[in-house]
Amino acid sequence: MPETGSPPGTDDTPAPCGRFAPSPTGPLHFGSLVSAVASLLQARRRGGRWLVRIEDLDPPREVPGAADAILAALDHHGLAWDGPVLYQSTREDAYLDALERLAAAGLTYRCTCSRKVIARVAAAGIAGPIYPGTCRRKPPPAGRRSAIRLRVPAGIVAVSDGHFGRLELDVAGEIGDFVLRRADGLFAYQLAVVIDDADQAVSEVVRGSDLLDLTPAQICLQRLLGFAVPAYLHHPVVTGPDGNKLSKQTGARGLDDGDPRPNLVAALAFLGQDPPEALRAASLDELWRWAIARWDPRRMPGRRDAPAPPRYEM
Ligand code: GLU
Ligand code: ZN
């Protein structure tokens, strides 16, 4: 065993399970490659499993062929996942089940407020407008098309993030009663991610720091549903020349299908693992062996008290 990195699990702790959960809104770009690499390394470093889940919950935002293109790009870069890929579009029954459980416990309510009305009356929060609870106090008439919201319990929810440290959030006050199912029938990311991470027995969620602020809301839902809370490790996100997160929706370029090694070396460099130049000439197998043995998330840049990571030039 190399000396660096976190200690491997002991015999009585189950092997960890990580996942990469892209939304099929475009091809795999450098920012999502970084997420895929970090989540794979964090799981494999300790001999764990690594799953891929396609978060195809929102058909209007999806790009035809993107899911297959993402899987092909992962494969091309030697990111080999365990088991079958899970598609959220096949998970309606599980989401309905959880909604029913929450409803039976009196933890949800119907909401008919339009986006426009909410924008007018709600204060701005860290994850969009903070819903003021209008329909919680005055239930809308039966039969009207409605969203389902969670009655978020009062209190502080804390996350111990493996990279960014402890974060405390008053979810009810700062996010508010968030939507679990939209009025158009689509399930919300917050509900789906929590149910799927639990059903897939994901023990550590590794993803970009843009999702850090939503984590307490997810933990709140995990507790209400009686799920184990996984460990969380958020990595710094890759930003473009404009300083914003690289994202598929804003047209970040997909990775090409040429030599995958320079992309992987760049991802490892972004994650602070100091890959040697020689790795570009190694075989893909050797490159991955090096990366797994080397992986130590403590090398990642961008802790809250440290300088920002370098920008990626598209
Ligand atoms: N599907 C989300 C995205 O592509 C990631 C969700 C997660 O990792 O929890 O941004
Ligand atoms: Zn409402």
Image (cartoon, rainbow, N blue to C red):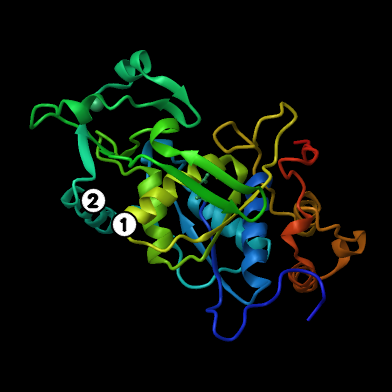
Q: Which residue appears at 56% of the width and 53% of the height?
A: 70
- Could one spot residue 27 in this view of the protein? no
Q: Look at the numbered discs 2 and 1 and tell me whether their residues touch, using CB distance below 8 Å.
A: yes
| Residue 101 shown left or right of residue 126 in the figure | left
* Residue 193 in the image: above or below residue 243: below
89, 107: nearer the viewer: 107
User: Farthest top residue?
Assistant: 120
Query: What is the x, y in percent for residue 152?
Result: 33, 40
The residue singled out by tag 1 in the image is 225
46, 81: nearer the viewer: 46
Residue type pointed to by label 1: Leu
Query: What is the x, y in percent for residue 141?
Result: 9, 27
Report the quarter where the N terminus lies: bottom right
Residue type pointed to by label 2: Leu
Q: Which residue appears at 53% of the width and 43% of the height?
A: 168
- Disc nearer the start of the sequence (2/1): 2
Instruction: Determine crowd level at label 2: few under 14, some 14-19, many 20+ residues with C-alpha closer than 10 A.
Output: some
The residue singled out by tag 2 in the image is 102
Quarter assignment of residue 87: bottom left
104, 153: nearer the viewer: 153
Instruction: Determine crowd level at label 1: few under 14, some 14-19, many 20+ residues with C-alpha closer than 10 A.
Output: some
Query: What is the x, y in percent for residue 136?
Result: 22, 31
User: Farthest front residue?
Assistant: 155
